[in-house]
Amino acid sequence: MPILHAAVPVRLPAAVLLLLGARTLGAQTAVVYGRATDSGGVPLEYVRVQVTGAALAGLTHPDGRYRIAGVSPGTIVVRASRVGFVPALDTVTVEPGDSVGVNFAMRANALFQDPVIVTAAKRSQFLDQAVTSVALVSDSDLARRAVVTVDEAVNRVPGVQFLSGQVNIRGSSGFVEGLGSRVLLLVDGVPANEGDRGGIDWDIVPLADVQRVEVVKGAGSALYGSAAFGGVVNVITRDIAVGIHGRARATGGWYANPPSDVWKFRDGSGGLGGVDLTGSYGTEALRGALTLGGRHSDGYRQQDASDQWETAGRAEWLPAPGTRVTASGAWTSHQYDVFPTWCGPSQCDTHGQAFQPFLIDTSSQGSYTRSNKGYLFATVDRTASPRFAWMARGSWLRSHFTDYHPDDWSVSDRLGAEVRGVAHVGGGDDRVLTFGAEGAHTHVTSDIFGNLGQVASHDEVDVAAYGEGEQRLGRVRLTAGARLDGVAVDGVSQAVQTSPQLGAVLPTSLGTWRASVGRGFRAATIAERFVTTEAFGFQVIPNPSLRPETAWSFELGDVTTVSSWARLDAALFWTEARQLIEPTFLVDPSGVAKIQVQNISRARLRGLDASLTMTPIPSLTGAIAYLLLDARDLANDSVLAFRPKHLLTLSADYRWRTLSVGGDFRYSSRIERIELEAVFGNDPRVPAKVLDVRAGWQRGALSARLLAANALNYIYNLVPRTLEPVRTVSVVLTWTY
Amino acid sequence: MWSRVACAGLASATLACNGGLQPTPAFPGISGIVTYRGAVPDSTQAVYVVAYHSFPHSRDSLFTFQPPVQSLDTLPLGGATAPYNIPVESGRYEWVVAVWVKQGFTLANADSTLRETGYYRNPADTSQPGVVNVLAQPAESIDFVIDFEHMHPPCRYYTPPCP
């Protein structure tokens, strides 16, 4: 830990001195400004306007205006893009000291997604150049769907499903009772999984600060290492515009009551509400933004209330063209009641029922958790020339939870650092090399990750080096890369893993084909190694010698325009996994049954992930997404637990002037097998059929969104004895300045 | 176009209707008295009574019994007889069986550490298991013998059975 503590403060002042020297270059540059509107002349906010070939970009304000300073003189191409609109280009010539106006009237077309992504290759690239499947959730999607949290936004992405808060990308994670995640969460490219449990705190970033989310499907270990075993979710926060800006977002709503009187558990209805306030100020060189927010929910079942306070801030310094120094941070305090499992006979007053999905086991009454989490990141991005760019960052991530009744707690601190270079050999995109090194030190102190009831500390050190090269050969783009990871826990080496990846992209008359093969791995988390607690009446005992789980993933995909108004993106995927880490029963020498996390499973996950996006008329968009998943536990020759075979999502939205209506329908087939079958195997399980309906109104800086999530109040569960949300009607009012 | 949109909306609504979790009356249960024969083995961890809707003809179906594990109660050993009462849902049960569990049991070694040690028999043909129908009321007087000197591994009932 001392080594990493020292690395960040030494590196930053050196960079700052370097950048101060470069600032005098600004006097020889020009300014490009203008306005973006739709084809009807309505101003468009959040249009990304970029000077191509340079690291200069800006976002339009609510009145559609933008301004980009520091433009190098010469003939430049200005590009405007926004999800749902055809990108627009203009070429202008600027002289030193010029201010040149460039306006854009953009044509709506839902088939056009923002083509630039930053996650799949750890650098900016066009979406259709990625060798693996990538799904995007834009700020338009976030606003249109009126969601409150990041996980709600990701939960409708094709091929993605949440099981009681645990994200699955093509069935990657299943459900492991909160221990570990096979998906890596990034916040602006910085790893943000919990240091102790390896899980994901989806509330670590306020939704108000999220610009877009990129979801990379398939093993991402070749660039991201351990937790990217089953995919990567990168939450990208908003850029800060020049000038003074503000945003207020208020949410209010209520939960439906149980559909049957025998399940009734309170006299009135439960409510929810919250407020987020964001203010920002920016000049050409300095920018800052601050968000404050809070929300309360009564919950939709007994003992389900929660309160959350959050703050996030970001500061940017742009001392010279192509250089950006960013410091960002967030802190969230979340206190929530714990609903461990619903109750059955002899566990509560069931009113003569076999189970009561809205009531808890009375022995769990009074359980709640206080969860505090936050991060501080500092990053220097420098585009030194058209041929070379580099990035250096330092990060601190903390998660601290305290459980009450039963009492336990854990604090984890992760210090991380990364340096990365991107070389465009020859100055273009024909040959691109990405390389870097990454390290992290995690310190965990808790009373459940060690001897029962005793405070214990653990340290984990992760070091890695990676490199990836992309070469264009004719029409084909070939990619090859690898990452070497080393993991040590409490001073003992636990894993040295090499994760190679090969890929290719080929544009043809039948669409753009992509193919990739890569190896992924996930080292056991500190929680999986050392957890000592009680679950479902069984003692859970540690297993410090857990080995990493590994997998080879293959993918063959194609994205093609099937008509002038429809686009199909389909991929066949195949993953062979070994040594999967799962909880299992064993009996100790005294004959007592216990639960321990072990390397037990070999698994195969294969299937089809397809989505069809349609815009039959400019005001109507629709999408059909389908995941067919064949997930087998090869060790036991059975279906892999917690993986539904079919996942279908239907979406449609219609816009008329300032009004819009839409909806999503999500079908997930009945989960055929669950873990701990001996405990929960006889519990009722049903398919999930959830219909969300929404409506919106927007005029100028004001917008109102109505969302009826699970509008038909379909009662279901995905993991044992945990009821999924009932119908929730909410209204979101947003004012933007 | 509008008819297609309307149809899609209607289809979604129809698909989402019905199904889902429904209120389910509490399990009525099966109860009776077991009579012990033979000496209880020293390696005994526990003895349970469980019920199967259909015979477990493979290892995959071995753990499809009712009630759930956490609702299982160990039979009291040491006496000549013992009452039992297991909470199971309404339905037809082909096999109500006593399971002997050896010390050292795990899911992985279930074939060698579990034994059938007696089951409810058809009163009209005691060579065959008796079917128990559980309706709204508990099925009572489902009495049978537990013989610790004639225990059988679960694979005896697999298809094909073990040698």
Image (cartoon, coloured by chain):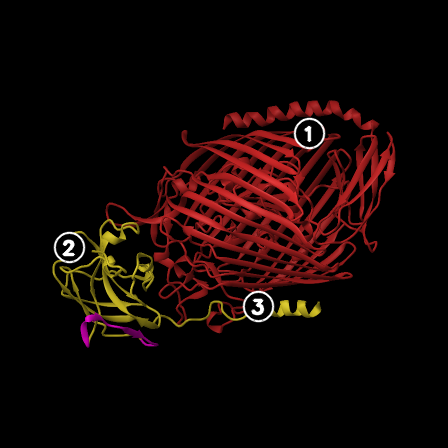
| Crowdedness near tag 1: few (<14), some (14–19) or many (≥20) residues, C-alpha within 10 Å | many
Residue beneath disc 2: B41
Write the residue at 29% across / 61% down. B57
Write the residue at 33% across / 60% down. B61
For the question of whether residue A159 can be seen, the reply is no
Chain painted red = A
Residue A139, position as x, y percentages in the image: 68, 50
Depth check: give the residue in front, A479 or A261: A479
Depth check: give the residue in front, A128 or A35: A128
Residue A136, position as x, y percentages in the image: 63, 48
Tag 3, which chain? A
Dot 2: element: loop
Tag 1, which chain? A
Which of the two discs, 1 and 3, labels the residue nearer the N terminus? 1
Residue beneath disc 3: A712
* Left or right: residue A260 compared with residue A215: left
Write the residue at 60% across / 69% down. B11
> Relative to A216, is A39 above or below?
below
Q: Which shade of the palette goes to chain B?
A: yellow
| Crowdedness near tag 3: few (<14), some (14–19) or many (≥20) residues, C-alpha within 10 Å | many
Q: Which residues are magenta?
A: B124-137
> Relative to A328, is A259 above or below?
below
In which image quadrant can residue A287 be found?
top right
Residue beneath disc 1: A382
